[in-house]
Amino acid sequence: MRDDFLKAALAIIGEPNILINLVSRRVKQLRGGARPLIDSLERLDYEDVALREIIEGKITYKLYMGSGA
């Protein structure tokens, strides 16, 4: 995992635990055959692809706030 991608993605997401969950879910999708949402001339690991997708705004997240009951 490239450190520069990690730092840039963390600056966008802000919360390390959310970033970890977001990247791990996307890596599972990519390993399952999903196409990357970015174009890259260099060969990237799935983790780096997920981080670049976050950096480029291709992947976002929304916190679910349950009913609380």
Image (spheres, rainbow, N blue to C red):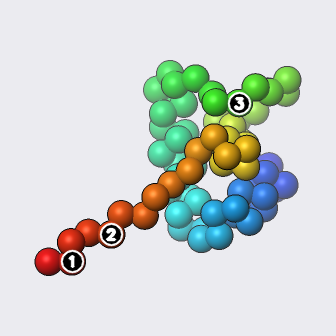
Which is nearer the N-term, disc 1 or disc 3? 3
Residue drawn at x 54%, y 67% as measured from the top left: 17
Marking on residue 38: 3
Q: Quadrant of residue 58?
A: top right
Would residue 42 appear left or right of 32 to someone viewing this image?
A: right
Image: 41 above or below 12: above
What separation in Å lies between label 2 and label 1 (alpha carbons)? 8 Å
Residue drawn at x 60%, y 68% as measured from the top left: 16
Q: Amino acid at mark 1?
A: Gly
Q: On the image, numbered disc 1 is attached to which residue?
A: 68
Which is nearer the N-term, disc 3 or disc 2? 3
Q: On the image, numbered disc 2 is attached to which residue?
A: 65
> Label 2 crowding class (10 Å Cα cut-off): few <14, some 14-19, many 20+?
few
Name the spot of residue 62 as percent of width and height, x first: 46, 58
Would residue 27 appear left or right of 10 to someone viewing this image?
A: left
Tell me if label 2 and label 1 are in contact, CB under 8 Å.
yes
